[in-house]
Amino acid sequence: MTIKRKSIFLVDDAPTNLAVGSETLGEYYDVLTFDSGARLLKILEKAIPDLILLDVAMPEMDGYEVIKRLKSKPQTACIPVIFLTAKNDAESELEGLSLGAIDYVTKPFSPPRLLKRIEVHLLVEAQRQELVHFNDNLQQMVDAKTQTVVELQNAVLKTMAELVECRDITTGGHIERTQTYLHILLESIQERGMFANETAVWNLDLVCQSAQLHDVGKIAIKDSVLNKPGKLTDEEFEEVKAHPVFGAEVIEKIGESTTDRTFLEHAKIFALTHHEKWDGSGYPNGLKGEGIPLLGRIMAIVDVYDALVSKRPYKKAFTHAEAVKIISDGRGTHFDPALVDVFLDVADKIDTELSPTGVPA
């Protein structure tokens, strides 16, 4: 059976960009190119693509105006749109994302990275459509299909998390590893009866799944900053420091369309507070001590631990023993002292969860 190829509409006023884009994508997708937003809107009256790649800076009608018109019509509102732009400021990216774009790709783009991001977004869209179709028939299938809904939700969230991770070429596997460490730490906390008022009602699997979204705000960070091999400038670091707030806003937006918010409340706490420090020197809000939510204090430890034992372009990977010492040294300054004590007790178990390639065993 022949599998129908996905269709992509590429819109750019530069003929060279259209040629390069068409050549890059043509091997995998059916590609139609347009040199203006007006021509795109005209053809959309007759044909709907699976995804649109849209230039921002175009004469007569720029990409922002085009996407506003797309989102205003029911027949085009759900088409995924990725902006292609030479702009590299966070404000422009945030404006595009707020108008409904699903991603930003800076020109000149890397063909392999563009293809990967398109692949991930098409997968998310396919899963979204399947979920919508499923929900339309949910009343008749609720008993038999409840588990399917849960699995599909997890798949969508995992894909969203992987989308963020694929933009950050320095942190492969970070999300999966931090989930593994988090589960170990949470189990030990519950077994000890610590923070019982909070932890007794936690579903550990649900909490750990929600942790997948702790770095979702990185989608707003420019590629040039996210993957910079050297030290960040003060301005670049300020952009990075904004990602917890943006992540929380994204999760809050998702929550507007659901009544069961427990999962997303966990995710929002992880996203917003995992860079706060016990002594108040963290970001984005300078929270201090127990003013930092418990989930944020726990995630701070596993997030830093994984960053330490992972290789980065600007540093070598620390050994497990070196990382444990750094966490221990941060007791009472960076980290909650009580949680550091738990971490030290389960550190050997965390170490055994890593295979020789650095992937959870």
Image (cartoon, rainbow, N blue to C red):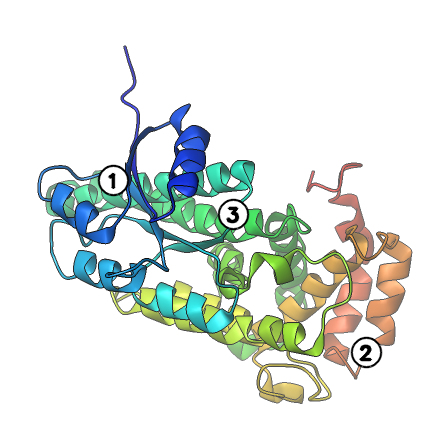
Mark 1 belongs to which amino acid?
Glu
User: Which residue does the image show at 58% across and 73% down from the upper left?
Assistant: 239
Q: Quadrant of the C terminus?
A: top right
Disc 1 designates what residue? Answer: 130
Relative placement, left or right, of 311 versus 144 is right
Neighbourhood count class around disc 2 (C-alpha, 10 Å): few under 14, some 14–19, many 20 upward: some
- The quadrant in which the N terminus is found is top left
Tell which of 343 and 329 is nearer to you.
Answer: 329
Instruction: Report crowding for label 3: few under 14, some 14 to 19, many 20 or more residues within 10 A (C-alpha).
Output: many
Residue tagged by mark 2? 331
Q: To which residue does mark 3 refer?
A: 162
Q: Secondary structure at mark 1?
A: helix
Location of residue 190 in the rendering, given as x and y in whole percent from the top left corner: 61, 66
Kind of residue at badge 3? Glu
| Circle nearer the N terminus (3, 1) | 1
Residue at horizontal 47%, vertical 43%? 117
- State the residue at coordinates (24%, 61%): 60
C-alpha gap between disc 3 and disc 1 = 19 Å
